[in-house]
Image: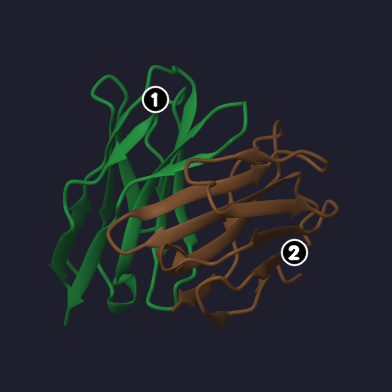
Amino acid sequence: AQTVTQSQPEMSVQEAETVTLSCTYDTSESDYYLFWYKQPPSRQMILVIRQEAYKQQNATENRFSVNFQKAAKSFSLKISDSQLGDAAMYFCAYQRQGGSEKLVFGKGTKLTVNP
Amino acid sequence: NAGVTQTPKFQVLKTGQSMTLQCAQDMNHNSMYWYRQDPGMGLRLIYYSASEGTTDKGEVPNGYNVSRLNKREFSLRLESAAPSQTSVYFCASSGGKGGGRVEQFFGPGTRLTVL
């Protein structure tokens, strides 16, 4: 079974600075998707970024980018120019390509942004 | 376009009571999911429906039943609620196989307390 591990229960960053959240996963599949979801205090799950395993290029979405290391099974999220609104729980998730498309989540990292 | 809607937003039950959580999506998605979120545990899949007319168990199905009423609606039923089912419940949907529509879109969640 696939597993996703987020080793940092909590992280903090100063406003305008950069922070990196770590995620590792375990799978025997070669084709899959990886996601980062943000959950602010409102509880809503918001998709931040997605990465297809077959793509070597790291995904970017404005201030959010990933470092995808397929061989190492690592998928970290970098937030640049951190803003107060970035404060939230961040979840890393894995999805096998094809099949049932179920998401397997890590336990999350709570990010605090200090003014 | 409301996306994924869930009712109710909050619910308190006594042990042994039953209830149904409702979920609907207006994105014409094929697949729908029910997750629960417990503190420190991330989200875990309860049941999913890959397409209209099919349902399958996820990681934590015990104590729950589901119904895929039509393509839009996917309900979760607790027949005899237990305190261990106190959690936040999320419904999600995705486009299904093909076309790259793999992202899951989440509803706002239902906070359920079982006394």
Instruction: Residue type at mark 1: give it.
Output: Gln
Q: Which residue is mark 2?
A: B24
Q: Nearer the viewer, residue A94 or B69?
A: B69
Residue under pointer 1: A56
Q: Tell me the brown chain.
A: B
Looking at the rendered structure, the kind of residue marked 2 is Ala
Callout 1 crowding tier (Cα within 10 Å): few <14, some 14–19, many ≥20: few
Residue A100, picture quadrant: top right
Image colour for chain A is green
**Where residue A11 is drawn, which disc sits there?**
none
Give how far apart the Cα atoms at labels 1 and 2 are: 36 Å
Q: Is residue A36 left or right of residue A96?
A: left
Q: Position of residue B98 (x, y in %)?
A: 71, 31
Identify the residue shown where x is 60% and y is 60%: B91
Tell me where residue B87 appears, x and y as whole percent: 44, 67
Q: Can the viewer see residue A15? A: no
Q: Residue at x 54, y 67 (%)?
A: B81
Position of residue B14 relative to residue B43, above or below, is: below
Q: Nearer the viewer, residue A46 or B83?
A: B83
